[in-house]
Amino acid sequence: MSGAAKILHCHSTFAAGGKEVRCAKLISAFGNGLQHHIVSAMPNEMGARALIDRKRAQVGYPADFPSLTGRPTPGRLIEIAQALKPYDLILTYNWGAMDVVMAHTVFAQHLGLPPLIHHEDGFNADEANQLKRSRNWYRRIALGRAHSLIVPSETLERIAVDVWKQPRQRIMRIPNGIDTRAFSRKPDASKLRLVKRDGEKWVGTLAGLRAVKQLPLLVQAVRQMPENWHLVIVGEGPEKDAIQKAAVDAEISHRIHLPGAISEPEKVIGLFDIFALSSKSEQFPLSVVEAMAAGLPVVAPDVGDVKSIVGERNRNFIAVRDNAEALAAMLNEIAQNAELSAEIGSENRSKAVNLYDARQMVDRYAEIYSSALAGKWSR
């Protein structure tokens, strides 16, 4: 469809984490009325491309796009800006794409660039404890000509207004959504390449294996659970060796499983008995909503909007952050009370269906993108 509007997606990474999964699902949902090009600041981390329905979407991965990493010199910024000209809409994601946002702001008028919408989903380990002042100033300036700034959480909305000084009318908060029906179906054990033996119980998580997820901390917490409880970490990333080392050090390697990333998490998450996070920083983690839709209790640190996302009874199991002992206590309390676990899971499922279904999310994104495209596309 040569007349389809062209959209450029600039990502910090396109590994299969929360924002990347959401992007892939939106691309698939919008169908063939758009042409999508995806670039990543980490060209070797492109696992989320497997999640895009190629029968429903036109997608390309330009190899000649300027690097998203490097010093923001005038020469580099104008090179990026020139590369934006062939598109009808620019979509940028997180700090790793902020130089694209800056290039757009500096050269948009001079080069007649298309509108840009920035998405901010959270922070890596280097800003998990405290935002960097220099980056805050850079964001303030770079976002000056953005059509919209989309955030999934109340926490990020406050930061955008109070710290980055963005006008409220340009900030759009859209909670992450999923296909809740798909996650409520019976799981398919064959999709995980891992056998759940009789008597085993699983603490599970879906996460990019990155330092900010603090997965060795989750290993330490599971070490304090009964022997029949295992930890299953579904995902890929650079921290795999650190997780395996933590398992060896804790002498529970036989209870820690890393089956890699999967393209259909809805088919395996129901195999877990408890869903857990150990992250230093989150905002509105999609994986928590997925676990809720699957009817699972969630144990996680009190970061971002996690406590407000889960059901009322589940909020007692949101632990203090950076604390393996606190996580272990929460996990053990649920593990020892099957009735409580089922009640929490049921409440979580109801809340996910009522508030976080993908249809609402897709409609909101489509409305904002269509507005920016000014008649070149409507869903």
Image (cartoon, rainbow, N blue to C red):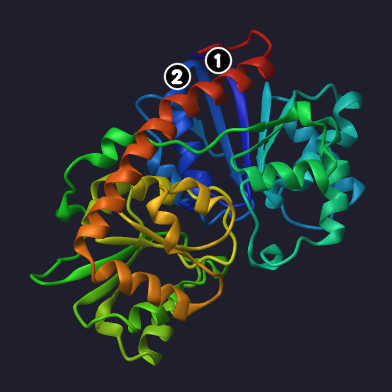
Residue at (50% x, 21% y) in the render: 363
Report helix, strand or loop for mark 1: loop
- Label 2 and label 1: CA atoms lie apart by 8 Å
Horizontal and vertical percent for residue 367?
58, 18
Q: Is residue 63 above or below residue 331?
A: above
- The residue depicted at 44 percent of the width and 33 percent of the height is 355
The answer to whether residue 236 is visible is: no
Q: Which mark is residue 4?
A: 1
| Residue under pointer 2 | 32
Marks 2 and 1 in Cβ contact (< 8 Å):
yes
Could you say where residue 284 lies in the image, as x and y percent from the top left? Answer: 54, 47
Q: Which quarter of the figure has residue 264?
A: top left
In which quadrant of the rendered view does residue 354 lie? top left
Left or right placement of residue 257 versus residue 338 in this view: right
Residue located 61% across and 16% down the image:
370
- In the rendered image, residue 77, in percent from the top left (x then y), is placed at 84, 44
Other-residue count near label 2 (Cα within 10 Å), few / some / many at <14 / 14–19 / ≥20:
some
Q: Amino acid at mark 2?
A: Asn
Mark 2 falls on what kind of element? helix
Where residue 214 sits: x, y (%)?
A: 51, 72
Horizontal side of residue 207 vs 37, given as left or right: left
Q: Amino acid at mark 1?
A: Ala
On screen, residue 69 versus residue 251, left or right, reads right
